[in-house]
Amino acid sequence: MTGTVTGVMALGKSDEYKDPATSIEDRRELKDSGETLRTVSTATVIGGAVAAAGAGALLFFTDWGGKEQATVVAAPFDGGAAVMVGGRF
């Protein structure tokens, strides 16, 4: 979710950058902040996908016969979400 929010913010900066009424100085600042937001957005989306794939792999490859226990908790927060994976082996 954080990646989506920062991506939308980057698109907003892009629209403001393309506005002919925007001064050259403001365009420089918008370009820098827009590129930073784009990078953060990409990194958080990739990080979330890697975490989800890791949690899925742990659940799929865990041997459930015996005393092993695995727990997966996902919770939304303001500005993002959290996934916790835990287990006893």
Image (spheres, grey):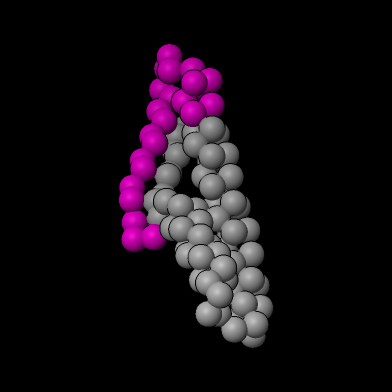
At x 53%, y 20%, the residue is: 61
Relative to 24, is 66 on the left or the right? left
Q: Quadrant of residue 73?
A: top left
From the viewer's side, name the closer residue of 19 and 8: 19
Q: Does residue 24 lie above or below 1 as drawn?
A: below
From the viewer's side, name the closer residue of 55 and 76: 76
Q: Does residue 81 lie above or below 88 as drawn?
A: below
Q: Is residue 87 visible?
A: yes
Q: Position of residue 42 (x, y in %)?
A: 59, 51
At x 55%, y 64%, the residue is: 14
At x 56%, y 75%, the residue is: 20
The residue range painted magenta reads 56-79
Relative to 9, is 37 on the left or the right? right
Q: Does residue 37 lie above or below 82 as drawn?
A: below
At x 41%, y 30%, the residue is: 70
Q: Is residue 89 visible?
A: no
Q: Position of residue 6 (x, y in %)?
A: 49, 60
| Residue 58: in magenta span | yes
| Residue 21: in magenta span | no
Q: Position of residue 3 (x, y in %)?
A: 49, 53
Q: Position of residue 85 (x, y in %)?
A: 45, 39
Q: Residue furthest front?
A: 20
From the viewer's side, name the closer residue of 1 and 61: 1
